Amino acid sequence: MTRLGLFVGILVIVALAVLVGGVIDFERDEMQREIREFGPLAPVIFVLVSGVLGALFVPGPVFAILASALFGPLLGIPLGIAGSVVCALICREVGSHMGRDAAEEIAGARLGQLTTWLDRYGLLAVIGFRLMPAMPDAPLNYAAGLTRLKRWQIGLGTAIGVIPRTLGWGLVGATVGGGSAWLATAGGALIIGADAGGAIAAIFAARYLGISPRMLWAKLRGAPAEPHAHGPTGKGRWGAGGGSGGRLGRGKVGHMRIAIDGPAGAGKSTVARLVAERLEFTYLDTGAMYRCAALASLRGEAAPGEIEIDFAPDGEVLLAGEDVTLLIRSPEVTSLASKVAAEPSVRAGLVERQRELMAHGDWVAEGRDVGTVVVPDAELKVFLDADPLERAQRRAAQLGADVNEVLAQQNERDERDRTREAAPLKAADDAVILDTTGLSIEQVVDQIAALATSRTQG
Ligand code: DC
């Protein structure tokens, strides 16, 4: 945290020194002379120098104009784009070394869903941010270094995203370098068009992803879970178990398997149970099976992959015939379950059993890999997520435990579930991603039931 704070402080000072204090001063003619001295290497030197100066907050358009003025638009525009990519990659390296861990901790707790989006839409996100108007280059580049975005996503996304404006400024540069004034006019029009197009696209993308400035601000402040925990309708408590959603009386929607995956505390079991109840499907809690494997392992019983697990008609979990419904919720079992679940032999045995169970009939199955591994051909896949802090708050309220303790354990389990080799927790490519932050249980159940209905009708 100290390092991240220091880093941001230094960046602010550098930005002020360059943008307000004018400490970096260059004459175009002088630079033209100096660059020319490098002969055939001049374009390469230009790209490297513009990358470094860009990282020192010299605004991007300066280089786009210079490149065109120095080398002509045909070479200058590609060089301008290359300079932007070099700048983005330099900033990414610096940013990721200076504060990624601390940033992840802050973003993980406050902006969990945004992290999920960046993981999912990495390249598109970079292109999108580049296309947006009034985005300051260097701060954006450093911010990208604080995320889990990959180098190729940042590089390629930047190369694509800066094209319209670099083209515009490049045409302006062509006029500066002695070309017709019409080039600058066309460049100006292109820049205005790119800004307007970027703004419109940003508005649509934000609406599509359900992002609003108010929501972002609330998340950054670590807004209390209160409006979400009970939902806007005030009905239904997350994690409280069945009942609150009620039935719509729609009845069965047809033969199908609904896979609901997501991290701990996202509301999977509450929601899956209610969806199953509403649609008259059978509910399958795959997590309970891993918990059974952990319990068997704690007891030193048969190899966890070979245990006999059954579900009684009223939902009790049976381990070799014994009712272990409550036992498998103990903290020891909970903690061991995520370790046991990382063992491929355990997974193989349980996945086979889950497929066997779901071979016939209609199911709502929840877990971590139902849509990706167990039934990748499921008719409907949903990935439920929510702010880590809110997830911990829901679970703490449910268990009557301390939020910070629950959050720490949850982060540890999430990390283990997400990074394990065997079937890590992730959304299937064709899963519908549902952020339950800010939604009531009823709203989530309604959405899934509606999706299920539309899938059978479609
Ligand atoms: O959903 P739960 O907390 O009851 O799950 C218990 C553990 O089992 C959890 O650490 C993740 C793991 N699990 C899994 O790896 N794959 C599943 N399909 C379900 C659960």
Image: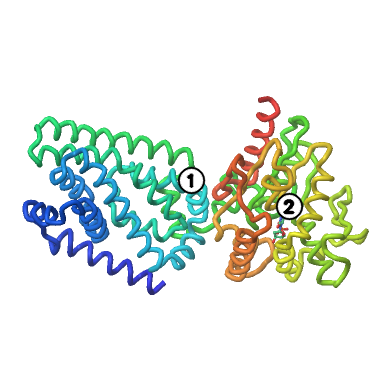
Secondary element under disc 1, as helix, strand or loop, is helix
Q: Which residue is mark 2?
A: 241
Q: State the residue lying farthest toward the front.
A: 40
Q: State the residue lying farthest toward the right.
A: 321
**Residue 358 vs residue 446: left or right?**
right
Say which amino acid is labelled 2: Gly
Q: Where ligand 1 lies, by quadrant?
A: bottom right
Identify which residue is drawn at 59% across, 65% down: 411
Query: CA–CA distance between discs 1 and 2?
Result: 33 Å
- Is the residue at mark 1 in contact range of ligand 1, meaning its CB lies under 8 Å from it? no
Identify which residue is drawn at 64% across, 56% down: 424
Residue placed most toward the observer, 392 or 154: 154
Image location (x, y in percent) of residue 181 = 9, 32
Mark 1 is surrounded, within 10 Å at the Cα level, by few (under 14), some (14 to 19) or many (20 or more) other residues, namely: some
**Residue 159 vs residue 302: left or right?**
left
Secondary element under disc 2, as helix, strand or loop, is loop
Mark 2 is surrounded, within 10 Å at the Cα level, by few (under 14), some (14 to 19) or many (20 or more) other residues, namely: some
**Residue 127 vs residue 326: left or right?**
left
Say which amino acid is labelled 1: Tyr
Image location (x, y in percent) of residue 10 = 27, 69
Q: Quadrant of residue 2?
A: bottom left
